[in-house]
Image (tube, grey):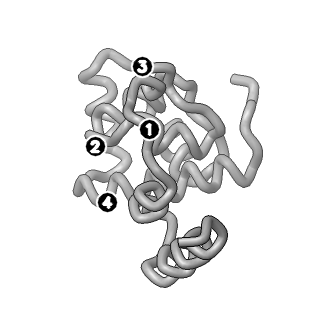
Amino acid sequence: MERTSTDEQRRSFAEALKMYLQRANMRPADLMRAMQADGFAVRQASVSQWTTGTSEPSRHFVYAMERLLNLQPGLLSRHLGYLPTFAVSISPVDVETALLADDRLTPDQRQLLLATYRTLIGL
């Protein structure tokens, strides 16, 4: 498959995937089996490459992973630079809610960004 993402995006995706697998108490092999049970032709080598950031899964694989890991649409796919089309139907989220929900931020980073945002908009 031709790569469409950058090295940084693939690394970000890999870190997010590992984090969500850990939260779901799953290993990469468990994800592979779940995807296979869902009808996807996935090999262990592919899943390993996704979790190391050396390759990227196709979009339909990413959407399946989000579903199988019970994630909101876009939580994984955004790292590769796209959102599923059905994510558009999700209600808009205000900036403060988005900052509070961003699992890539530490609590200190969230508070700093919230304070900066509130200062910028004059709250």
Q: Which residue corresponds to mark 3?
A: 41
Q: What's the distance in space between the residues labelled 2 and 3, CA to CA?
A: 14 Å
> Which of pointers 2 and 4 lies earlier in the amino acid sequence?
4
Crowd band around label 2 with a 10 angstrom C-alpha radius: few (<14), some (14–19), many (20+)? few
> Which of pointers 4 and 1 lies earlier in the amino acid sequence?
4
> Which of pointers 1 and 2 lies earlier in the amino acid sequence?
2
In the image: residue 109, left or right of residue 37: right
Q: Which residue corresponds to mark 2?
A: 30
- Res 103 quadrant in image: bottom left
Q: Which residue corresponds to mark 4?
A: 22
> Which of pointers 3 and 1 lies earlier in the amino acid sequence?
3
Q: What's the distance in space between the residues labelled 4 and 1, CA to CA?
A: 28 Å
Q: Residue at x 48, y 79 (%)?
A: 111
Residue 105 in picture, x, y percent from top left: 50, 70
Q: Which residue corresponds to mark 1?
A: 92
- Res 6 quadrant in image: top right
Q: What's the distance in space between the residues labelled 3 and 1, CA to CA?
A: 34 Å
Q: Nearer the viewer, mark 1 or mark 2?
A: 1
Judging from the image, what secondary structure is the residue with disc 1 in? loop
Residue 122 in picture, x, y percent from top left: 60, 71
Judging from the image, what secondary structure is the residue with disc 4 in? helix
In the image: residue 69, left or right of residue 16: left
Crowd band around label 3 with a 10 angstrom C-alpha radius: few (<14), some (14–19), many (20+)? few
Q: Which mark is residue 70?
A: none
Residues under numbered marks 2 and 4 in contact, where contact means CB atoms less than 8 Å apart: no
Q: Residue type at mark 2: give it.
A: Asp
In the image: residue 46, left or right of residue 97: right
Q: Residue at x 38, y 34 (%)?
A: 91
Q: Residue type at mark 3: give it.
A: Ala
Residues under numbered marks 2 and 3 in contact, where contact means CB atoms less than 8 Å apart: no
- Is 88 placed above or below 110 here? above
